[in-house]
Amino acid sequence: MSIIENVAGLSDAGMKCAHGIAEYYLRNQIRFRDWEPGAGSFFFEYDAFGIPQLSATEWAIAFAAMGMFSAAKVFDDQRYLYAAQKMGVYLKSLQIFDPFIPEHRGALREHTPQSTWCYVRDGLSGAWGFVDFYRVTGEEEYLERAVLWAEWYMRKGQDEDGLPLWGVDLEPPWRDGSALMRNDVLGDFHGGCLNFFYHLYKATGDKKWIGDWYVSFAERYLKYVQQPDGYYRTVIKATMSVPENDPQGGLHKSNDDLTSLGLLCAYKATGDRKFLDGAEKFLAAVARDQQPDGFFEQSCAGIPVVLNTVLEAEKLNVPHNFTGESECRALKALFSRQNNASMYPYLEGGMDEYGRGGACSRSSAYSLIVLLKLFAGDERFLAVP
């Protein structure tokens, strides 16, 4: 049986969880007023005391908008459509067209129009959002913006060996040490690049986006970043070896930052079975390490990511070791992390990523998209077309 058939008995709980997340975004989005500089955005995370931690990043805006577009369709609620559209307006404000910094034309700033830097992989997900805005709205501007970002990436987002950079300073920083930049490493998160460029190819029909450089990167990533145990780990570029300490402290494990999904895209782009084998190897690892309570690790962000990979892998006949029982356990674990607003009403519905009482957009957006794929059949987002 497929994952959709296996989890059908949790449909009511899944739809309730998804509706709660959509309401959380609606409740916490900065209202769209022309005097409000953050209009359309929201805070990325709240701690256990309800204190906001960061303004949303470009990638968080993109994935939240995907989820809200889906919620608008599934729940037939125009409020969610309006919220997603206004997220798009804010995302556009992060793209650089400043004539005084022409070398970074098309790049996306990290948090706000004042951010002086970006993480390349984060900007890529923001540009992926542009592709999906184009697919949903039909507005050519969004596709042009995605192409402009891709062209910036080719100029400024990769090193001389064709490997993506960790980050780029777009202007002189406001203060020293404003962002962690480890351009000496290839991140365990960089495999997600394979998604955007494949989707850009599908949207434009231009095969240059999945050309020799794309295949070369995919092959090197699979060879050096995926480890024998199936997981992806950051490697030092000079030696292609895993450093003693992960620069991100293990942030991407079961949440592979959509790398396995990218390998499925690489397979569709090339027809090379080894990319399916890589995704299969990852799914075997997380299935093996699933805990009795259904979680894969402390963070719940990996649950929707893994289940989405299972869903998309099944379409390509990629075997995995998940059963209906293990998939349902994972979903019940995810549901248990939804904030019940026992202390702060505005956090109701958001996903408490680490079980500490707060709410985080990473797990909230991923969950909203994937729950509506599993239980409402809206498979437009985080897919392999």
Image: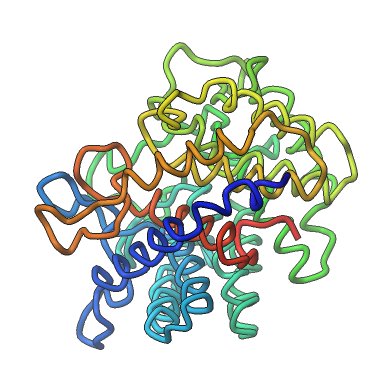
Coloring scheme of the render? rainbow
Q: Where 322 falls versus 201 (above or below)? A: above
| Residue drawn at the location 61% of the way across and 23% of the way down | 285
Q: In the rendered image, which quarter is residue 146 located in? A: bottom right
Q: Quadrant of the C terminus?
A: bottom right
How many marks can you see?
0
**Residue at the (51%, 32%) spot, across then down:** 254
Residue at point 66%, 68% (across, down): 147
Furthest residue in direction top, as rendered: 244
Q: Is residue 99 visible?
A: no
| Residue at (65, 56) in percent of width and height | 196
Give x and y (percent) for residue 42: 28, 65
At which x and y percent is residue 328? 52, 41
Does residue 190 show up?
yes
Q: Nearer the viewer, residue 32 or 346?
A: 346
Measured as percent of width and height from the top left, residue 339 is found at 25, 51
The residue lying toward the viewer, choosing from 274 and 369, is 369
Return the residue found at the far right. Answer: 271
Q: Is residue 118 left or right of residue 349?
A: right
**The N terminus, quarter of image:** top right
Q: In this view, does 303 lie to the left or right of 146?
A: left
Q: In this view, does 319 lie to the left or right of 85?
A: right
Q: In this view, does 47 lie above or below 375?
A: above
* Residue situated furthest front in the rendering: 9
Instruction: Name the one closer to the observer, 159 or 359.
Output: 359
Residue 361 x, y percent position in the rendering: 35, 54
